[in-house]
Amino acid sequence: MAVPVKGKSNPRAIHDVPLSREAKMWARRVMPRIRTRLAEANRVPVGVLIWGPGISSSSPLARLRSTLRKELRRDGHAAFFSEELCDARTNHSVRLQQLAQAQEFDLVVSLPCTTGSIAELHDFAADRRVNGKTLVFINGTHADGYANQSIASIANILSCRVERYASDREISIIKTITLEEVQRIREMKYILAGRF
């Protein structure tokens, strides 16, 4: 089966036997249903938990974090910050609350902005209940040191996905990768829904 290349589809370039009158009628009935199914797939929400610096932080990642949440919500996704979900009145630690949250979301996007916050990721990066759905973005200027090297080794062994970006001036790649990953998950949720 030929797979169309995105942006390269041109039905007129295909020279073939024309459809019969009955086949054209069938196509007229089916094409709107295909568009309806694709529109339905575009309404499947993905649960995205976005970790990173507090929104009042001066870090550019704080602004990016807010932007990601807004854009994902505009596209119909359930995007949240952990601090929106944590309950200060409970006797459960923040770590336990965040683990419980991460277990329920489809994707956890982590935007650590300091070497210390990279070290905090170890709580979750080694936990098989959530590491397969964790997408971590590491600033290239934090490449040295135990915390970063340890996350990198965990990612290789236990499947926590780590993406690197060059510096705070080049964070647009974070948005691009995150939105692509969310779309991939959305499509898989729609595709797999028919199998269960």
Image (cartoon, rainbow, N blue to C red):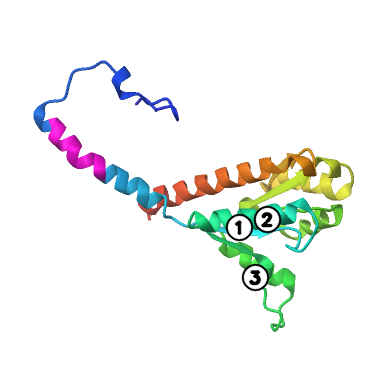
Instruction: Name the residue type under label 1.
Output: Arg
Q: Provide residue 106's location: percent of width, then percent of height.
A: 55, 57
Q: Residue at x 10, y 32 (%)?
A: 22
Q: Which residue is mark 2?
A: 65
Instruction: Name the residue type under label 2.
Output: Arg
Mark 1 element type: helix
The reply to whether discs 2 and 1 touch (Cβ–Cβ < 8 Å) is: yes
The reply to whether discs 2 and 3 touch (Cβ–Cβ < 8 Å) is: no
Mark 2 element type: helix
- Which numbered disc, 3 or 1, marks the residue that appears first in the sequence? 1
Tell me, yes or no, if residue 61 can be seen here: yes
Q: Nearer the viewer, residue 137 or 36?
A: 36
Residue at the right extreme of this rendering:
145
Q: Residue at x 39, y 50 (%)?
A: 41
Q: Is residue 25 magenta?
A: yes
Q: Residue at x 63, y 62 (%)?
A: 102
Q: Nearer the viewer, residue 148 or 109?
A: 109
Asked whether, in this view, residue 116 is left or right of residue 76, the answer is right
Q: CA distance from mark 3 to mark 1?
A: 12 Å
Neighbours of disc 1 within 10 Å: few (<14), some (14-19), many (20+): some
> Which residues lie in the magenta part?
23-32
Task: Write down the quadrant of residue 155 in the picture.
Answer: top right
Instruction: Name the residue type under label 3.
Output: Glu
Q: Is residue 20 above or below residue 123?
A: above
Q: Is residue 81 above or below residue 71?
A: below
